[in-house]
Image (tube, helix red, strand yellow):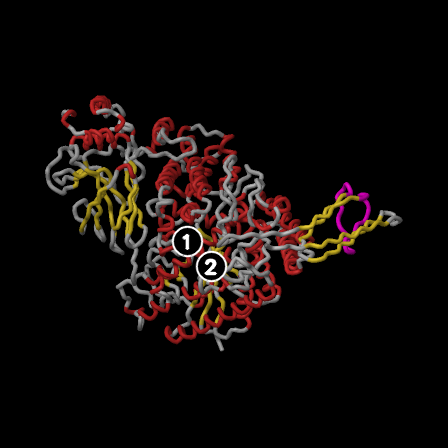
Amino acid sequence: MKEIGYLLLVLHAHLPFVRHPEHEYFLEEDWLYEAITETYIPLIDIFDRLVDEKIDFRMTMSVTPPLASMLGDALLQDRYLRHLEKLIELAEKEVDRTRWQPEFNHLAKMYLDNFRKARSIFVDRYQKNLLRAFKKFQDLGKLDVLTCGATHGFLPLMDTTKQSVRAQIKVAADHYRSVFGRSPRGIWLPECGYNPGDDEILNQNGIRYFFLDTHGILHGSPRPKYGVFAPVYCRSGVAAFGRDLESSKQVWSAKEGYPGDFFYREFYRDIGFDLEFDYIKPYIHPDGIRINTGIKYYRITGPTDHKEPYQPQVAREKAAYHAGNFMFNRERQVEYLHGRLGKKPVIVAPYDAELFGHWWYEGPQWLDFLIRKISCDSKMLKLTTAHDYLKENKRNQVITPSFSSWGWKGFSEYWLNGSNDWVYRHFHEASQRMNELASRFKSANGLLERALKQAARELLLAESSDWAFIMKTGTVVEYAQRRVKDHILRFMRLYDDITNGTIDEGWLADVESKDNIFPDIDYRIYAS
Amino acid sequence: MKDLNSLSKKELLDRAKQLKIRMPYLYRKNELIKMIQKKEMASQAVPGTKPQSAEDKKPSLRGKKLVEKVSSRRDTAGDTKPYYEPTYHTEAAKDESPSRLAVIAARRVAPSAPKGELPLSYEQTKIVLMVRDPYWAFVYWDISTSTIQKVTGLMREHYGKMRPILRVYDVTDIDFNGKNAHWNFDMDVILDAKNWYIHVGIPNRSYLVDLGLLDAQNNFYLVARSNVAKTPRDVPSDVIDEEWMAVDFEEIYALSGGFGVGLSSAEFKERKKQLLEQMVSSPGFGITSPGVTSPGMWQKGKRKGFFFEVWTELLVYGRTMPDAKVTVSGEKIQLRPDGTFSLRYFLPDGDKNLPIQAVSRDEDDTRKAEIRVKKDTIWG
C-alpha cells in the first residue's frame, strides 16, 4: 500500500547572536552551550545513526544565520569546549560523590557518558564545527536546512522600511551560501511573521517556500480549498505551508502535551541549586550565583515539591510510547483527510528545536522513535520536505496569505506592546540612515567600506526579534535593552563618523571584533 | 499678551506647564506670573533663530508627507490644513559635502540624551503607523524643535481651545488626497507621549493617521501624516475561487484548527515563553555588569510552601608520597601532584565503611585505614 499522506517535521533552531569576547565569562553565552550539549549534538547524533543504519528519513530544520554564525565562530567553539570540559569534570566528581546513592550514581554515570560522547562528536567527528554536520545531512538529501531572517528580525514591523526586510532576507541568503555551499530553497520566517508582499522579496532571492501559522493560510484570499493540508502559491510563485494545530498541540500544549509526563526528567531540580556551595562553586557563575549545570537527578513526579529519582529506562519507554501515539494520531488524521480532500494531505508540524533535549529532555529520543516508526512501520504516512512535496505536487492553489505570526494571539502584539514598542522608532531611523548611506556610497573601499559594513551589522543585530521578545517575557530585560541600545548607538556613531569623514579606526576595529557577524556583508543592499 | 493677572492659579499652572517651568506649584501667584512673562518673552524670540532649511527630510515612508503650504487659515470646519510647511525636502543624501551632512548628523542626535542612552528625538517631524493585530494599530511620532515651537505658539494663540489629536482615516482601496477617506475619527492625545495605541476596530481595512491640532471651530492643523497600513483579516476571506471551491469549507476550516486559532496559539506562546525562561539559566544580565548583583534564581521552579532540607556529606582527605598508589574500596584514586587527596561522598543514614590503602611506589610499604561512619538524622 502506498502512503496516503505526508508528515513534514520542522525544527526551528535559533538563538540570538550572543558573543562577548570582552568578558572572560559571559552568562548569556551559556544559552548556546546548553543548546549544543542538550539539543544540537543529540539531534546530530540521531541523524548520524539513522544514516549509518540506512534508515531513509526527511527532516526540515532551520539553522538561523545568528546560530550558524555562532556555531562557526572559533572563539565560541573554544569556549564551548571549555564549558564542556568543566561539565565532564563535574560529572566525574558526581560519580564519586554519589557512591552511596545508587539511585543517583547511575545517573551521574549517564551524564558523564553523555558529556564525553558530546565531546567526541564535537571535537573528533566535526572538528568543533557543527555546521559540518548539518551540511552533511543536507548534502545526503535527508535534511532540508532552511534559512531565516539574517538576525531573526520580525519582518511585519519593518513594513515601513522595506530596505530592512530586503536586507534581512538577502544577507541571510548570502550567508547560507557561504555556509552550506548552495542557495537556500526554503526559509523559516522569523516568528512566522508574514506581511503580504514579502514573498516577492523571497522570490527575488530564489527562495521557493516558507511556513506560516495556521491562520496565515486559512485567512488568505481567496479561501484555501484544502485548508492547511496543502501548500498554496503566493502571486510571486513562492509556496507557503501552514502549521497543523493538532500535531503542534500534542507536543507544545502544557496540559495535553507529551513533555509533561510524570516520568520525564524534571527541568527545575538541578544540582547547581541543590548541592553544597563550596563544592558546586567552580561550576556556577563566577560571582557565586547558582545557575543550572545541566545535571538533574529527578523526574517530574507530579504537581508536588517531592520529586522521585529519574529512571532513564522508564522515560525512554514513555518516549517510544508517545512517538507511537503521535504516529497513530497522524495516521487517523491523514486517513480522514485523504477521504475528505480527495488527495494526499501534508501535515506540517513545526517546533522550536531547543524544546527537544534542552527543555524536553527525552524529545530527541521521541523524535528518533518517531522517524524510525514512520520509516519502517507506517503504511499510510511518509516523511517529506517542502522541496520533495512540491516536486511531486506542482499544481497548487494561488492565494494571498494573510498577515500573521505564530506568536501570542497570532499577530504582532508580542513584539509590539508597552514593554518594547520604544525600539521601533530607532530601528526605522537607523534603517533609513543606512539606506541613505548605501545610496550615497555606491562603492567604497578601505576604512569607509569597513565602517559601512559595520553599520549594516549593527542595524541587523539591533533588529533581532529576540530583544523585544525578552523585554516582553520579563526574563533578562536589562540585557535585551542594553543590546538594542548598544547596537543603535554604535550604528549612530558610525553614521556620524562616516558623514563627518572622521572614522576612528581603533574604535571601529574594536566594534568589528565584538560584533563580528556576517564578515562578507554587502551593505549596498540597503540602497533603494 | 493676555493679562496674566486675570487668570486663575490653575490656568496659570497649566500655562506654566506648557512653558516647561519646573514645579510651578512651588511659586506664589505673582512669582509665577513673572516667570511666565519671562518665559514667553524668551520663547517668542526663539523662532527664526534656527535656520529651518537645515532640517532635512528622511526618504519618505510609504505614502507621502504633506508639504502643501497653507497661507492663511480659513474657517472651513473639518478641512485639513497644514499650518506650516515642513521646509525640509533637501535631498541631503545626494550631493551634500561631508561637512554639510555632518551638520545635519550632529543636530539629529538630541543633545539631551545621557551617555549610553538613545536620543529622545531625531529632530524631525513624522508619524509612523504600524499594525498590531486585526483591531489595533500603533503610531509613534517625532516632532522637531522648530515644529514644537510652532505648535506651542499656536496653542498659546488659541489658549485652552486647541488640542492635539490623531485623525484616523479609513483609506481602503483609495488613493488618499486628504479629503476622500471612507470615514475618519479623532482621538485626543498627549503630544509628549510620542506614541499611541489606536483601536481601529475593523479588520482587513487600510488606515492612515494624521497628527495635528484641532481648534474650537473644528479647524485641523496638520503636523504630520503617516504611512498607510492595513489590518489583517480575522476570519476567512469571502473571496471564493470557483475552480478551487471547497465542498465544505467550514469543515476544512475546522479540521485545520481554524476555530481554535487564538486558543492554541496562546498556549503555544506560553510554552515558548517557558522555553525561553529555561534558556535563561541565570539571575539576569545584572550580574555580569560589575556592581549590580541580583539574588539567585529561585523563582524558577519555586517551591510552593515552606520547606527544610538537610543533607550530609562525608569529606575524607589525607596525604602520602606523591608517587604512591592509593585505593578506596579497592579502586585507585588520583592524587594531587603534592600527594594530597580529597574524597567527598554523599552520606545517607546508616553504617558506612570506607577502606583506604596506600602502597609505596616500590610496593614495599603498605598502610591501611578504614573509616567507619554511623549516621542518623533525627527529624523533629
Left or right position of A422 against A35: left
Q: CA distance from mark 2 to mark 1?
A: 11 Å
Image: magenta residue range: B320-339
| Residue labelled with disc 2 | A351
Residue ID for mark 1: A191
What percent of the width, then of the height, locates residue A229? 39, 67
Of A17 and A236, nearer the camera is A17
Q: Is residue A410 magenta?
A: no
Q: Earlier in the sequence, mark 2 or mark 1?
A: 1
Whether residue A63 is visible here, answered yes or no, is no
Which residue is drawn at the image coordinates 42% and 52% (left, top)?
A190
| Host chain of mark 1 | A
Q: Secondary structure at mark 2?
A: strand
A328 vs B340: above or below: below
Residue occupying the point 61% across, 47% down: A83
Tell me which corner region of the image, top left, top right, bottom left or bottom right, holds residue A219.
Answer: bottom left
Q: Is residue A189 above or below residue A52?
A: above
Depth check: A107 or B221 in front? A107
